């Protein structure tokens, strides 16, 4: 989340997140959303990425990010580190450079997903992928 504060009600669980936090989910879930901090001077602003599952599989195979599944929990909120926030900032800056967006946007989105898979969000990001996809390719280079 870039600016503001939000509360998510998922079943009986309540999650709060604010500027600098990330929400990750292994699956789409029904939820109630409440925007808590929002003014005309400081409107609510968030970025949502829905990565291609094939990209998640590719990154898991190429990296050492072999995350375990969520262990029954399909969602989580965590603070984003500086590198992840910087990648989001660079992606948002591309909105002012539409001529660069088509080329740089997918690269930065890949970096964001890579960083999510290496952080505390990893179990929920990787949790929607089949078990075989989380295992490294056996001696074969992946594309």
Image (spheres, grey):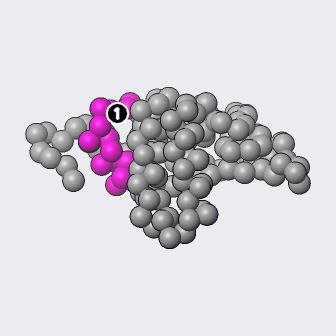
Front in this rendered view, residue 21 or 16: 21
Q: Which residues are magenta?
A: 53-68
Left or right position of 136 against 11: left
Q: Residue furthest right?
A: 40
Q: Give residue 15's position: percent from left, percent from top.
A: 70, 34
Front in this rendered view, residue 102 or 18: 102
Residue that appears at 44% across and 59% down: 104
Front in this rendered view, residue 136 or 32: 136
Instruction: From this view, report whether residue 75 is shown above or below residue 38.
Output: above
Magenta span contains residue 131: no
Q: Give residue 76's position: percent from left, percent from top.
A: 58, 34
Left or right position of 124 against 129: right
Q: Give residue 51's position: percent from left, percent from top.
A: 46, 54
Residue 72 visible, this orientation: no
Q: Which residue is mark 1?
A: 65
Q: Quadrant of the N terminus?
A: top right
Q: Residues within 10 Å of mark 1 (few under 14, many from 20)?
A: many
């Amino acid at each position: 989340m870039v600016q503001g504060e939000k509360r998510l009600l998922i079943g009986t669980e309540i999650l709060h997140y604010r500027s600098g936090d990330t929400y990750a989910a292994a699956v789409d879930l029904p939820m109630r959303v409440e925007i808590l901090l929002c003014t005309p001077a400081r409107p609510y602003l968030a970025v949502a990425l829905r990565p291609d599952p094939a990209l998640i599989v590719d990154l898991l195979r190429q990296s050492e990010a072999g995350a375990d599944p969520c262990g029954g929990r399909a969602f989580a909120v965590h603070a984003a580190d500086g590198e992840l926030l910087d990648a989001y900032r660079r992606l948002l800056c591309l909105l002012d450079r539409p001529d660069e967006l088509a080329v740089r946007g997918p690269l930065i989105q890949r970096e964001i997903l890579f960083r999510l898979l290496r952080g505390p969000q990893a179990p929920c990001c990787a949790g929607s992928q089949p078990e075989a996809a989380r295992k490294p390719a056996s001696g074969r280079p992946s594309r």
